[in-house]
Image (cartoon, rainbow, N blue to C red):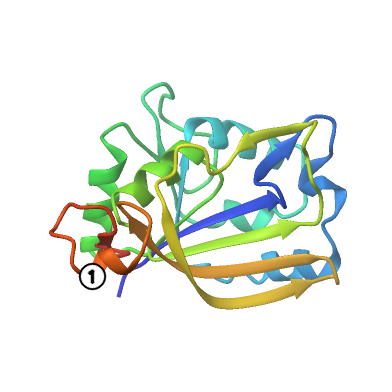
Amino acid sequence: MAELLVDFITSLDGYGAAEGWPGLWGMGGPEYFAWLGDQPEADYTVLMGANTYRAMSGLAAEGEEGTESLASMPTVVFSRSLTAPLSWPNSSLVAEDAVEAVRGMKDSGTSMRTIGSLALCRSLLKAGLVDRFRVVVFPVINGSTGQERIYDGYPDVRLDLLTSRTFDGRLQLLEYAPTVLTGPPGEQADTDPPGEPGDAVPAGA
């Protein structure tokens, strides 16, 4: 069955990057890079937006560690500003609505994963299309220098833990099954009519 995986790296306080810090906060280690090299979802199609595409293709051109495996995976870039052909290998450009395009890809049996692309991931989650939500938490707090707040604009989401793992004694991988809520959960949720606070949107709907 096709699935959609949203995949983030994050500081403990929910930032995707920080001004003045190196990539991966300078904390990527051999266990983590080995896991990336194993390509746990090597047969999945990678989804990204224009900003992430520009950043990742630039890192790949500079030989950044960890980008080699991504270059071998089929990639779909959602953008109305980029033009084809894209320089990233095995990539295609889609200008249509991302939610409807991804819904159609899932219906056709294509499993997918995201890279970065905060607005894209937020839209796909709100639409109830995300089956698995994965974060690798780096042990830093970027209260002063943080950039790219990951969860701003998200709905309330209940996360059921599927698996966890520690890399290099410091990086924590967490995988969840998400359920999008229309309001805070509570005893009233069981009796609320459809559309009232407490209702849930099943993941992967």
Label 1 neighbourhood size at 10 Å, few (<14), some (14-19), many (20+)? few
Residue occupying image coordinates x 77% and y 48%: 24
- Viewer-nearest residue: 74 or 106: 106
Tell me, yes or no, if residue 109 can be seen here: no
Q: Residue furthest top?
A: 81
Identify which amino acid the numbered label 1 is placed on.
Answer: Asp
In the displayed structure, would residue 41 be above or below residue 124?
below
The residue carrying mark 1 is: 190
Tell me, yes or no, if residue 204 can be seen here: yes
Residue occupying image coordinates x 27% and y 64%: 188
Percent position of residue 201, x then y: 27, 60
In the displayed structure, would residue 191 be above or below residue 83?
below
- Viewer-nearest residue: 36 or 118: 118
In the displayed structure, would residue 9 be above or below residue 151?
below
Percent position of residue 65, x then y: 77, 52
Percent position of residue 186, x then y: 35, 65
Q: Is residue 98 left or right of residue 43?
A: left
Quadrant housing the N terminus: bottom left
Residue occupying image coordinates x 54% and y 36%: 53
In the displayed structure, would residue 145 be above or below residue 3?
above
